[in-house]
Image: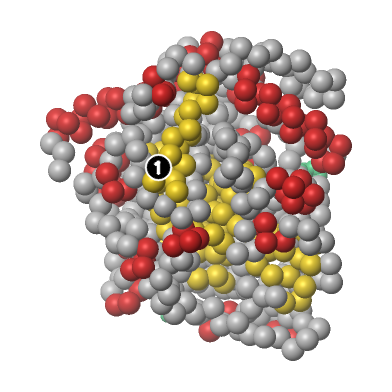
């Protein structure tokens, strides 16, 4: 175990490079129309895929997760002290004939805890929050994003930030470098995915990390806000509690449907992608333990194996954990193939926000209004009997958030700078010292990806390429600090602009 002095030294360093850990939760505890935050003691209006603590149900609280006994005293994450609940809507594919099946999830979820803001506090006991909004059906910004240097330094427009907190990463492991995190904020077009996303889509959800000190709020959102650059930057006034930047990555094998006519849908009935969201109930043993971990787990590898305070368990052990399926939703067939989304969720295209609909099985809605299948329903009972995690799957479930800060080249055009508030945060620092490659003066950012037990570092180097912007690019104009990346943006933009509008 590290001595206190060693930890303190590392912490000082961590302010420069955003220390983090990557929590693998390789199995789901269950897939069901449950949402203890939004629909406590009730059936949720869309399905969720849930990871983490085993004592999850229709009315779960912090205590239920963290301090339960019996067989639900477990977690599908690899750190036993973390029985937090992490959940998102899963991804579905609707075939041309209307039938719907869940897109296979590859490798569970990675929940990142990244330490961007200063003076970090652990999530308190009883803390919960939601990022994103199931009713959203449009992305109103440019593609690719306006350069960070042009984003407002005062984060008053939280809708702007929330939209950019969602990512659909087109995975192609043969491509080097891989697509950056939080690059696309809605589904790529199906034909683009068929041609390019050979390894599926990584759905990404960034959570707000500035809090007002409350544990929760009536909408589960207004007690937290995004800092000015989503993952870092300035917190809005009154939101001066700094939490770890929580970031979910969940991979779906969309490539299974390459060449097949149909469309991808979020379980909310969303063919756009912008309704993607994530929910979190803090379920760590104690806030004190989490705080200790934040202080101690500063190894730049981000690997939980490198954190001495964690008690680890294997994927196989984690896979034995599941939540008890409430009888109200036991008959749902959340994986399909089935007729329509589970259960009775209408597809709403937007761009206007989605409206409420009747929830089959809910208090005043008879189950007879449950959308009928054209063939007799095959009731898939989603009880998770023990099965070892599929090594072939987990080996390809790569993580990808850009962990290192952008370079001084980026800082030169104002990235994350707010001199008045002295809040340049981690944004103006050099690449991390753990890689010899990233010490190179040309390295402007570093991405780590995980392949099984291997962490592979990708260093993006600055190249002196001048980008000549095309006329249809809208706001795209600033000289590129990272021309390589910008050049790729340009290519993608050209390919997609018309398809998206
Ligand atoms: C919460 O749900 C559990 C089982 O799902 C039930 O036993 C318990 O009574 C519920 N609690 C409340 C307060 O409704
Ligand atoms: C885009 O979505 C937001 C949030 O739902 C909504 O307020 C806005 O009206 C939508 N834009 C259009 C053009 O419908």
Q: Is residue 289 left or right of residue 126?
A: left
Q: Quadrant of ligand 1?
A: bottom left
Q: Quadrant of the N terminus?
A: top left
Dot 1 beta carbon under 8 Å from ligand 2: no
Which residue occupies 74% across, 47% down?
195
Secondary structure under tag 1 reads strand
The residue sitting at the bottom extreme is 376
Q: Callout 1: 10 Å neighbours few (<14), some, many (20+)?
A: some
Q: Quadrant of residue 265?
A: bottom right
The residue sitting at the front extreme is 174
Q: Is residue 125 visible?
A: yes
Q: Is residue 162 visible?
A: no
Q: Quadrant of residue 182?
A: top right
Which residue occupies 34% across, 38% down?
301
Kindly identify which residue carries mark 1: 455
Label total for image = 1
Q: Position of residue 346 (x, y in %)?
A: 78, 66
Q: Is residue 282 left or right of residue 38?
A: left
Q: Position of residue 136 (x, y in %)?
A: 71, 49
Q: Nearer the viewer, residue 254 or 238?
A: 254
Q: What scheme was used to colour the molecule?
A: secondary structure
Q: Position of residue 451 (x, y in %)?
A: 45, 48
Q: Position of residue 377 (x, y in %)?
A: 71, 86
Q: Quadrant of residue 316?
A: bottom left
Q: Quadrant of the C terminus?
A: top right
Q: Nearer the viewer, residue 45 or 456?
A: 456
Which residue occupies 20% across, 30% down?
8
Residue 427, above or below 248: above
Q: Nearer the viewer, residue 7 or 106?
A: 106
Which residue occupies 52% across, 13% down?
409
């Amino acid at each position: 175990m590290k001595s206190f002095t060693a930890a303190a030294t590392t912490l000082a360093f961590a302010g420069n490079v955003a220390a983090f850990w990557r929590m693998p939760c390789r199995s789901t505890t269950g897939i069901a129309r449950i949402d203890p935050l939004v629909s406590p003691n009730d059936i949720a209006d869309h399905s969720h895929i849930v990871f983490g603590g085993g004592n999850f149900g229709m009315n779960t609280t912090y205590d239920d997760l963290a301090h339960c006994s019996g067989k639900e005293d477990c977690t599908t994450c690899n750190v036993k002290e973390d029985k937090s609940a992490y959940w998102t809507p899963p991804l579905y594919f609707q075939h041309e004939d209307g039938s719907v099946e869940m897109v296979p999830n590859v490798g569970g979820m990675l929940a990142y805890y990244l330490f961007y803001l200063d003076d970090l506090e652990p999530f308190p006991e009883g803390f919960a929050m939601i990022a994103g909004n199931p009713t959203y059906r449009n992305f109103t910004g440019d593609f690719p994003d306006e350069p960070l240097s042009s984003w407002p330094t005062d984060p008053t427009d939280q809708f702007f930030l929330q939209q950019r907190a969602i990512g659909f990463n087109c995975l192609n492991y043969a491509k080097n470098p891989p697509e950056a995190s939080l690059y696309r904020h809605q589904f790529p077009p199906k034909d683009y995915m068929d041609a390019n996303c050979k390894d599926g889509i990584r759905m990404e959800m960034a959570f707000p990390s500035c809090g007002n000190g409350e544990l929760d709020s009536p909408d589960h959102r207004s007690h937290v806000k995004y800092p000015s650059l989503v993952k870092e930057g300035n917190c809005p006034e009154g939101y001066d509690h700094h939490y770890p930047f929580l970031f979910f990555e969940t991979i779906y094998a969309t490539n299974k449907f390459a060449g097949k006519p149909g469309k991808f849908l979020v379980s909310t009935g969303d063919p756009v992608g912008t309704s993607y969201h994530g929910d979190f109930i803090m379920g760590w043993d104690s806030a004190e333990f989490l705080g200790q971990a934040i202080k101690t787990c500063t190894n730049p590898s981000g690997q939980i194996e490198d954190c001495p305070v964690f008690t680890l368990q294997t994927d196989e052990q984690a896979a034995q954990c599941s939540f008890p399926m409430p009888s109200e939703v036991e008959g749902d067939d959340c994986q399909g193939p089935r007729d329509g989304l589970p259960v009775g969720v209408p597809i709403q295209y937007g761009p206007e926000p989605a409206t409420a609909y009747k929830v089959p099985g809910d208090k005043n809605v008879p189950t007879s209004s449950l959308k009928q299948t054209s063939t007799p329903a095959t009731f898939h009972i989603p009880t998770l009997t023990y099965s070892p995690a599929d090594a072939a799957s987990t080996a390809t479930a790569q993580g990808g958030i850009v962990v290192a800060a952008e370079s001084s080249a980026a800082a030169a055009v104002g990235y994350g700078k707010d001199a008045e508030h002295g809040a340049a945060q981690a944004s103006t620092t050099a690449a991390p010292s753990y890689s010899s490659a990233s010490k190179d003066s040309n390295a402007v950012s570093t991405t780590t990806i995980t392949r099984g037990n291997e962490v592979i570092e990708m260093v993006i180097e600055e190249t002196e390429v001048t980008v000549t912007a095309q006329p249809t690019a809208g706001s795209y104009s600033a000289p590129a600090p990272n021309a390589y990346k910008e050049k790729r943006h340009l290519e993608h933009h050209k390919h997609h602009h018309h398809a998206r509008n």
